[in-house]
């Protein structure tokens, strides 16, 4: 293969998304010979060997530290994407009950709801569809059912750019959240949840891994027909290794957890994320060439969709952005416009570069 050297861009992709360069460099350094002892890469190791067992155990330990996960919660490293867990959640958490409550705040909520309907009666307790999914419905408007097995919501809608800045209260009914696109961006009070799940390719690492954090008393009563590898209890008992786990993805996730710990943990990381989001939203709100439609108090710190006043300029905006090393700013096909995903791995300087470019582009084309 030819040796190529390419400057790294600021990657605003929504997922698969940017991974910290320090993590990639570390992995590169030990790619062919992990820790200079194994004589092979992590990809080539047995998942049941001592080396990989330690890699997975360290990753779990560090994730537990980062999120302060209580001892009565299991941490699972699974597969199938968050989409698979749209099905696995009802399979595991209905526990003989017939109904689940869902909040509908956008594209990912809708997908979770559609999947759950295959397994149970779904009660949509609140929805922001009336305003085109531009806000998070207040808790006071939720019509919770008394007999629901759990309450599901998507705490950060990646496509719409809506984030819950508060944790819902659901009493005795377990709260379940799809945190795919903002897990590890801020501290979370895990004990308020029955189950948290997140695909890795937004804010954790490469695609192929799904992290599930589940309270242990909720598992062990799956729907008949549930595949063994989707049975949270069986997977917990087998340290997520009934079958071969996505070993390289677990390893890179582990390196990302170390990277976050080195930066002071999630409270420190959150401060940077707040500054990044403020810089971008303050600029968007300060002029009328660009706009963001989301209610201010519900705006996502991770995914910032925005539109140009004249959409005929979209292609030019994207082309000139790419030429400056500002990559993957195109909005989701369902909403159009632009979207800047500013996950943990996207540094403050990347947002400064984006805002600088947006100002210049507005001046030249406004
Ligand atoms: C990306 C995403 C998903 C889907 O993840 P897959 O790994 O593609 O299944 C689900 N929910 C949210 C909030 C996401 O951002």
Image (cartoon, rainbow, N blue to C red):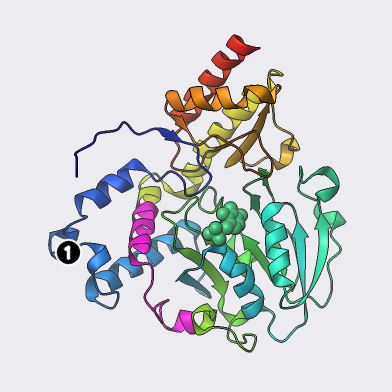
* Depicted 126 relative to depicted 60: above or below: above
Dominant SS of magenta comes to: helix
Quickly name the residue at label 1.
40
Residue 175 shown left or right of residue 125 in the figure:
left
Image location (x, y in percent) of residue 180: 56, 56
Q: Quadrant of the C terminus?
A: top right
User: How many numbered tags mark residues here?
Assistant: 1
Task: Please say whether residue 32 is visible from this viewpoint.
Answer: yes
The foreground one among 154 and 185 is 154
Image location (x, y in percent) of residue 218: 62, 80
* Depicted 196 relative to depicted 4: above or below: below
| Residue visible at 30% across and 66% down in the picture | 55
Q: Quadrant of the N terminus?
A: top left
Q: Which type of secondary structure does the marked residue at label 1 adopt?
A: loop
Does mark 1's beta carbon lie closer than 8 Å to ligand 1? Answer: no
The foreground one among 207 and 126 is 207
Residue 102 shown left or right of residue 58 in the figure:
right
The foreground one among 201 and 322 is 322
Task: Please say whether residue 179 is visible from this viewpoint.
Answer: no
| Residue visible at 68% across and 19% down in the picture | 289
| Residue visible at 71% across and 87% down in the picture | 96
* Depicted 339 relative to depicted 36: above or below: above
Image location (x, y in percent) of residue 142: 84, 59
* Crowd band around label 1 with a 10 angstrom C-alpha radius: few (<14), some (14–19), many (20+): some
Q: Where ligand 1 lies, by image quadrant?
A: bottom right
Among all residues in the image, which is located at the extreme bottom? 224
Q: Quadrant of residue 217?
A: bottom right
| Residue visible at 23% across and 36% down in the picture | 4
Image location (x, y in percent) of residue 36: 13, 59
The foreground one among 335 and 169 is 335
Q: What segment is highlighted magenta in the picture?
A: 234-258
């Amino acid at each position: 293969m030819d040796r190529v050297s390419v400057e790294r861009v600021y990657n605003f992709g929504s997922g698969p998304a940017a991974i910290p360069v320090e993590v990639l460099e570390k992995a590169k350094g030990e790619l062919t010979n992990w820790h200079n002892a194994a004589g092979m890469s992590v990809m080539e190791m047995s998942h049941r060997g001592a080396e990989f067992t330690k890699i997975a155990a360290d990753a779990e330990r560090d994730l537990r530290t980062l999120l302060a996960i209580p001892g009565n919660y299991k941490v699972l490293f699974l597969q199938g994407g968050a989409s698979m867990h749209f099905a696995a959640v009802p399979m595991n958490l209905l526990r003989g009950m017939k109904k689940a409550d869902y909040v509908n705040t956008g594209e990912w909520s809708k997908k979770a709801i559609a999947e759950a309907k295959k397994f149970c009666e779904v009660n949509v307790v609140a929805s922001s569809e009336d305003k085109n999914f531009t806000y998070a419905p207040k808790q006071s408007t939720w019509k919770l059912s008394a007999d629901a097995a759990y309450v599901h919501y998507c705490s950060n809608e990646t496509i719409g750019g809506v984030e819950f800045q508060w944790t819902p209260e659901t009493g005795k009914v377990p709260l379940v959240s799809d945190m795919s696109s903002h897990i590890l961006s801020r501290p979370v009070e895990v004990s308020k949840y029955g189950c948290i799940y997140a695909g890795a390719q937004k804010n954790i690492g490469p695609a192929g891994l799904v992290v599930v954090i589940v309270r242990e008393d909720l598992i062990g009563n799956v729907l008949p027909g549930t595949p063994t590898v989707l049975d949270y209890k069986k997977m917990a008992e087998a340290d997520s290794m009934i079958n071969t786990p996505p070993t390289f993805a677990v390893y890179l996730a582990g390196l990302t957890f170390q990277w976050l710990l080195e930066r002071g943990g999630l409270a420190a990381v959150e401060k940077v994320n707040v500054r990044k989001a403020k810089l971008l939203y303050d600029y968007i709100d300060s002029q009328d060439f660009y706009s963001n439609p989301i209610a201010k108090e519900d705006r996502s710190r991770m995914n910032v969709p925005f539109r140009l006043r004249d959409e005929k300029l979209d292609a030019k905006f994207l082309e000139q952005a790419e030429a400056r090393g500002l990559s993957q700013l195109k909005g989701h096909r369902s909403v159009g416009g632009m979207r800047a995903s500013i996950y943990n791995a996207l540094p403050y300087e990347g947002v400064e570069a984006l805002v600088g470019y947006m100002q210049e582009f507005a001046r030249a084309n406004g």
